Amino acid sequence: MIDVQDLKNAFMLRPAAVLGGGPSLPRDLKQIPKNSVLIAVNNHALHFCQPDYIVFMDIPNRQEFPELAHAIDTFYGVKVSQTPLSDVYIKSEKYWDGGFSSSLATWFACYLGCNPVLLCGMDCFQGEIKYATPRPDFYHPSMDAPLEDHLNAWRPALANCPNPERIKAVSGPLVEVFGQWDYAIIN
């Protein structure tokens, strides 16, 4: 197991993309720098790219979330979680998870020293289509939460992530919290 402290600033000033599962993910992926560290939130991004890391919060119930369970079992990169399935021991550091996998992934990207930390496919369950991949039978109560609830859940990242000024949203509602990343700055 890797101690998270051994990874502090391991990718100093290299861009990172935190890859959510919203419908904007395929479009957002086209906007990120080629040398970005790719950090998947759960298994969504595995349909579109080969991430370096996968971040998840819970040990998935194999019957309820078979895709996530399979992804964790077969993932070729580094698994990051507070669970025993993790390849990285994050509990040696004061980490912030904000209560969901995408915020833990954002903290992790900041901890790695990445700059910028680009939030991709983070649509906050807004709009008719909720996921980049078809998930007709999936439901989570956060899908019913108003946009302001999602934005309020993300605002603590500004106080709890290392160098939060590095966090930018590629598109979507989180632009309101973090500002929009300017593709022309790096490319």
Image (spheres, grey):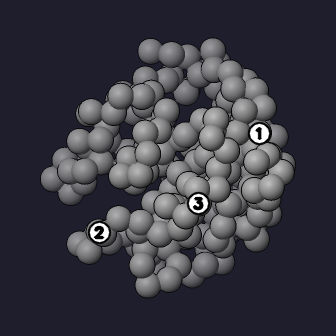
- Give the residue furthest to the bottom: 128
Answer few, some or many: residues within 10 Å of disc 1's Cα (few below 14, many 20 plus, some between 14 and 19).
many
Q: Earlier in the sequence, mark 1 or mark 2?
A: 1
Which residue is drawn at the image coordinates 42% and 78% (left, top)? 129
Residue contact between numbered discs 1 and 2, judged by CB atoms under 8 Å: no
Tell which tag, 2 or 3, sits nearer the viewer: 3
10 Å crowding of disc 3: few (<14), some (14-19), many (20+): many
What secondary structure is marked by label 2? loop
Query: Closer to the camera, 185 or 19?
Result: 185
Q: Nearer the viewer, mark 1 or mark 3?
A: 3
For the point 59% across and 60% down, the residue is 28
Which mark sits nearer the N-terminus, 2 or 3? 3
CA distance separating discs 2 and 3: 20 Å
Find residue 16 and report its horizontal and vertical position in percent.
65, 40
Q: CA distance from mark 1 to mark 3?
A: 17 Å
| Residue 27 showing in the rendered view | yes
Mark 1, secondary structure of its residue: loop
Tag shown at residue 28: 3
Q: Residue at left 25%, top 50%?
A: 67
Amino acid under disc 2: Arg
Residue 132's disc number: none
Nearer to us in this view, 46 or 107: 46
Amino acid marked by disc 3: Asp
User: Type of residue at label 1?
Assistant: Asn
Q: Which residue is mark 1?
A: 115
Is residue 62 or residue 33 the one in the foreground? 33
- Up/down of 23 relative to 129, above or below: above
Q: Which mark is residue 135?
A: 2
Instruction: From the viewer's perspective, tell me whether residue 54 is left or right of residue 104.
Output: left
